[in-house]
Amino acid sequence: MPILKILKYPDPRLRKVAEEISLFDKSLETLSNDMLETMYKENGIGLAATQVDIHKRIVVIDVSEDRDDPMVFVNPVVTILDDKSLVPCEEGCLSVPGVNVEVMRPDKVKLNWLDIKGNNHEMHPEGLLTVCIQHEIDHLEGKLIADFLSPLKQSRLKKKATK
Ligand code: NI
């Protein structure tokens, strides 16, 4: 299976909004497998299709310590259950290498998604998965951790990245 090329900040393609998936065929399974392989090779804990220049709503995640719990989320939707309960996390991103950004995110959320066969699922994620799925959904919306930095830090980062 091919390793996919990961777009790097400030590539404008990272800003595209991904489209919902409605076709659950073999190519979707192939895509999810390629994304997982790419994520593992790059030592990431999550990867959104946007990052490999495919603008469809699919993300892969593995937040397990042993890297043996691959998860695939199609059309994932997070519903915030308590917008006052925010938790900080130092986030990194394969598309924004070399920086960690502290992001505050809600930690009481409900997650709905489809699997690659098109079946509905729902859960209340905990811990790192809660952070990671919100980070990946941001990618599908064209949003990056760099956007959480101050304007000054953003312009420094952009300069460094385009050198
Ligand atoms: Ni990322």
Image (tube, rainbow, N blue to C red):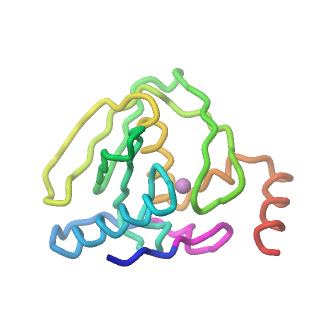
Examine the rendered structure and indicate whether residue 52 appears above or below residue 61.
Answer: below
Please provide percent x and percent y for residue 80: 42, 32
Is-magenta flag for residue 38? no
Q: Which residue is nearer to you in this view: 79 or 157? A: 157
| Residue at (44% x, 75% y) in the render | 4
Examine the rendered structure and indicate whether residue 128 appears above or below residue 92.
Answer: above
- Determine the image quadrant of residue 14: bottom right
Examine the rendered structure and indicate whether residue 4 appears above or below residue 125.
Answer: below
Please provide percent x and percent y for residue 115: 20, 54
Quarter of the image with the C terminus in it:
bottom right
Quarter of the image with the N terminus in it:
bottom left
Please provide percent x and percent y for residue 108: 42, 25
The residue lying furthest to the front in this view is 66
Left or right of 97 on screen, residue 61: left
| Residue at (44% x, 60% y) in the render | 39
**Location of ligand 1 given as a quarter of the image:** bottom right
| Residue at (68% x, 54% y) in the render | 146
By secondary structure, the bulk of the magenta-drawn segment is best described as loop
Left or right of 100 on screen, residue 3: left
Q: Which residue is nearer to you in this view: 26 or 140? A: 26
Is-magenta flag for residue 16? yes
| Residue at (57% x, 67% y) in the render | 15
Tell me which segment is drawn in magenta: 6-17
- Determine the image quadrant of residue 143: bottom right
Please provide percent x and percent y for residue 38: 43, 66
How many numbered circles are shown? 0
